[in-house]
Image: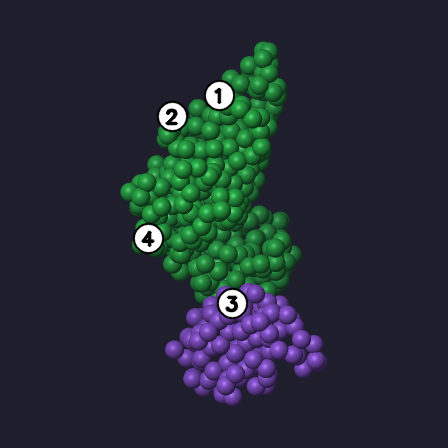
Amino acid sequence: MTASGDPVDLDNSVAAPPLPEALEAWRAGALDAWADERARHGSGARSRLVLDEVRGALATALGDPGCLVGLPPDHVRALHAAVLGCAAPGRADGPVVLSAVEHSAVHHAAADAARSAGSTEPREVPVDGDGRVDLEALERALPGARVACVQHANAEIGTVQDLERVHALCRDAGVPLVVDAGASLGHVPVPAAWDVLVASPRAWGSVAGAAVLALREGVRWRPHEPGEAGASRRPGEHPGTVDVPAALAAAVTLQGLLAGPLGAADPRHALVDRLRGALATVPSTRLVGHPDERLPHVLTLSALYVPGEELVRRLDVRGLRVGSGSACTADTLRPSHVLAAVGALTHGNVRVGLARGTGPEAVDRLAEALPEVVAEVRRELGAEDL
Amino acid sequence: MTAGPGGGAPDVLVVDARGLRCPLPVLRLAAAVRDLPPGTRAAVLATDPAVVHDVPAWAGMRGHTVESVGPVDDAGAKADGRTDAAGYRVLVRLGP
């Protein structure tokens, strides 16, 4: 058995330990901009100023200084706002189009939009075995659609979509495109191929409290939450306050990350390649997700005949903290819809997400422990020769 | 493992995995067909919804063919007399 070392976090595709710059910016924001940004006095003005600068900085970082930046409390709420805001009943009541591998919040919001508008069911576009959207199927689904939702990259399997082509198809069909960049912004360059963008600062190493909802000028968006009748609300804004310190941390950290190595240049890309190579030899397992068009820091693997929760538990005992898409590890006790959509085995799933600064030693420990743990569990279940 | 309820044609080996959670249904199926020749047909009955994904995934990894996948309204009475609620049935044929 591999010796246990200090615990190491290897489940950081959705939540990463906060970067020191995030904590510094948060603290400065908390001390300086705690006042309600709507207040008419000097303290409110101070918060308003910080918030305006933050929105401007984020818009610039996204490559569109003219876009409107909303700061909903978290990724899920930002996705709800993006989908429901664009799908609000109005002149166009066609269906919501979405890929099969969207975040579950997008699936929920799309179903909700269909129910409340009394309109047709959402049109789900299938993906191939690597998780890439079927572009021909997307093209067929777009005519008459109200809005299309295609993520930039997937947090579970790491596959990156061809957004330029997706957006071109949406443009030709006159359908606004909502892009969930919650797994990609801050890790890989995000092309300008979106009309609405959602991102998750928590996933790039900032603090929780504020997510990003960006609307290009001209995108039709309506508030979907209760609020003051007749009150004007900036597109993308939510009722309630903005977590200004968290928003400030998001802007500061994003600027820093975008100035550094992204994608294949990110050192994590090579670490994941190393892990892929080591784990490809484990018998009766499948690495899931596109081997090349992928996030630098994510890897997922499914192993036949073993329960995912058992793999996670035994790796945890060895100090290796990983995630899983298996039903036995989920709150809902349902398997990951992403694994199901790509036709991958849903049981025995281990998901790895590397935070920045993860060293090769952590990866090597996992490369050694995972095959051992899989073999151990199979032996106990009498599944060695199946 | 008998040609029990839901088995259909007599030449289908039925693996009753109702009440078992994944990965046991797949494990039982794999154990049941381990030494059987290509062309053998086997159906697994399960209440765990993951079988709908995992038996086809197993078949793909092992070079077998899925003939049908679907829910069953009445997975039939188990040997102890209890009738379970709706389940799933996946029919595979060994080999390509």
Give the CA separation, mark 4 to mark 2: 32 Å
**Same subunit, tags 4 and 2:** yes
Q: Which residue is mark 3?
A: B52
Give the CA separation, mark 1 to mark 4: 41 Å
Residue A188, visible in the rendered structure = no
Q: Residue at x 60, y 20 (%)?
A: A36
Q: Residue at x 54, y 39 (%)?
A: A77
Counting residues from the start of the chain, the first of labels 4 and 2 encountered is 2
Query: Splitting the image into 4 quarters, where does residue A152 fall?
Result: top left
Q: Which residue is mark 2?
A: A66
Tell me which amino acid carries mark 3: Val
Dot 2: chain letter: A
Marking on residue A140: 4
- Callout 2: few (<14), some (14-19), or many (20+) C-alpha neighbours within 10 Å? few
Q: Which chain, by letter, is purple?
A: B
Dot 3: chain letter: B
Q: What x and y, as percent, mark residue B80?
A: 71, 80
| Towards the viewer: A2 or A309 | A309
Q: Residue at x 32, y 40 (%)?
A: A174
**Same subunit, tags 3 and 2:** no
Counting residues from the start of the chain, the first of labels 1 and 4 encountered is 1
Give the CA separation, mark 2 to mark 1: 13 Å
- CB within 8 Å, label 3 to label 2: no
Q: Secondary structure at mark 4?
A: helix
Q: Which chain, by letter, is green?
A: A
| Towards the viewer: A200 or A384 | A200
Give the CA separation, mark 3 to mark 2: 47 Å
Tell me which amino acid carries mark 1: Asp
